[in-house]
Amino acid sequence: QVQLAESGGGLVQAGGSLKLSCKFSRPSIINYVMAWFRQAPGKEREFLAAISWGGITTRYDDSVKGRFTISRDNAENTVYLQMNSLKPEDTAVYYCAARRNVALSSSQSDYNNWGQGTQVTVSS
């Protein structure tokens, strides 16, 4: 069973930045597509970004394109989400997810490994 552990969340003012980390528990994160999702209170979980095995290919939701950047360090078994120009509407619990597949996906049902989430709160 793959275990994922997110960190880096917190309270930040609008316009600020945060960098989330997701540590992957297995010996190697290679062969896994990694993604970030978020869920705001009273809303469904939504896709943010995904990254391929080698980190060459990425996909973003339009709501965060240009502000958020997903990256990975396979040697450290870690995936990151750099978040800039944060807005109050970015307030949510942020989740890391993994799927053992070559194809990127924005559908949460395609991911069978999830972290516990980390809270991000953006104040106005």
Image (cartoon, rainbow, N blue to C red):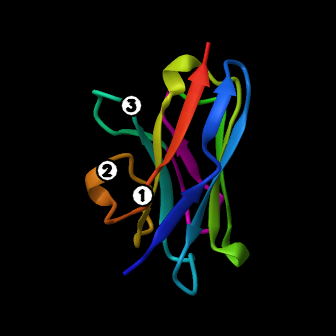
Closest to the observer: 94 or 104? 94
Q: Position of residue 98 (x, y in %)?
A: 44, 64
Q: Earlier in the sequence, mark 1 or mark 2?
A: 2
Taking the image as drawn, is residue 63 in sight?
A: no
Identify which amino acid the numbered label 2 is placed on.
Gln
> Which contiguous range is marked in magenta?
49-63
Nearer to us: label 2 or label 3: 3
Residue carrying label 3: 40
Q: Position of residue 94 (x, y in %)?
A: 48, 44
Assign a secondary structure to mark 2.
helix
Residue 64 lies, with reference to residue 89, above or below; the image says: below
Name the dominant secondary structure of the magenta segment: loop
In the image, which disc is placed on residue 12?
A: none
Identify which amino acid the numbered label 1 is placed on.
Gln
Q: Earlier in the sequence, mark 3 or mark 1?
A: 3
Question: Disc 3 and disc 1: Cα gap in Å?
Answer: 14 Å
Quarter in which the N terminus is drawn: bottom left
Taking the image as drawn, is residue 88 in sight?
A: yes
Residue carrying label 1: 116
Question: Disc 2 and disc 3: Cα gap in Å?
Answer: 15 Å
Assign a secondary structure to mark 1.
loop
Residue that appears at 28% across and 27% down: 42
Question: Disc 1 and disc 2: Cα gap in Å?
Answer: 15 Å
The single residue placed furthest to the top in the displayed view is 124
